[in-house]
Image: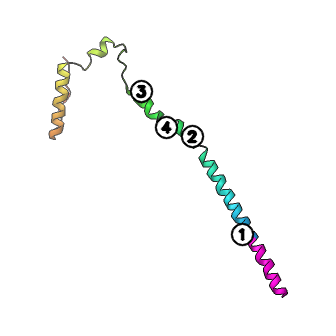
């Protein structure tokens, strides 16, 4: 009889130990979930800002002043013709011609 009572006491203590371990693990899991959840709104608020900044950096403002030197350099019919000729040569597999020099 004493043996059965001792066994019952040991079983109760073991079940209490298992419950406390389960409670501890649940608490740790809850803390980890809370820690991960706090950064999401901060990241969501900045979502797409890098893309927006890159797009703005590449956009040419129509009202921007253009200097006379910049408008002359590399524009017009001869420049476009040379660019297209070089592109055609590149697509056929031949080597591109050297750049023309001004006289």
Q: Work out whether mark 2 precedes mark 4 in sequence or the reverse, and give the earlier one.
A: 2
Q: Quadrant of residue 84?
A: top left
Looking at the rendering, in which quadrant would you find the N terminus?
A: bottom right
Tag 1: Cα neighbours inside 10 Å, few (<14), some, or many (≥20)? few
Side of 74 where 67 appears, left or right: right
From the image, tell me which residue sits under label 2.
Answer: 41
The x, y position of residue 4, in whole percent, is 80, 85
From the image, tell me which residue sits under label 3.
Answer: 56
Image height of 48 relative to 27, above or below: above
The x, y position of residue 76, in whole percent, is 20, 18
Tag 4: Cα neighbours inside 10 Å, few (<14), some, or many (≥20)? few
Q: Are marks 2 and 3 in contact (CB under 8 Å)?
A: no
Q: Work out whether mark 1 precedes mark 4 in sequence or the reverse, and give the earlier one.
A: 1
What distance separates the C-alpha of mark 2 from that of mark 4? 10 Å
Q: Quadrant of residue 11?
A: bottom right
Q: Work out whether mark 2 precedes mark 1 in sequence or the reverse, and give the earlier one.
A: 1
What distance separates the C-alpha of mark 1 from that of mark 4? 44 Å
Q: Which residues are magenta?
A: 1-15
- Is residue 76 located in the magenta-colored stretch of the structure? no
Image height of 62 relative to 92, above or below: above
User: How many numbered discs sit on the rendered protein?
Assistant: 4
Callout 3 secondary element: helix
For image coordinates 65% across by 54% down, the residue present is: 30
- Is residue 8 located in the magenta-colored stretch of the structure? yes
From the image, tell me which residue sits under label 4.
Answer: 47
């Amino acid at each position: 009889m004493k043996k059965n009572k001792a066994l019952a006491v040991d079983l109760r203590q073991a079940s209490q130990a298992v419950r406390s371990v389960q409670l501890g693990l649940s608490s740790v899991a809850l803390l980890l979930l809370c820690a991960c959840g706090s950064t999401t709104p901060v990241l969501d608020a900045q979502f797409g800002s890098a893309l927006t900044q890159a797009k703005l950096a590449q956009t040419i403002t129509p009202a921007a002043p253009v200097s006379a030197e910049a408008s002359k350099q590399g524009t017009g019919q001869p420049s476009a013709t040379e660019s297209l000729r070089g592109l055609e040569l590149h697509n056929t597999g031949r080597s591109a011609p050297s750049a023309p020099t001004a006289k």
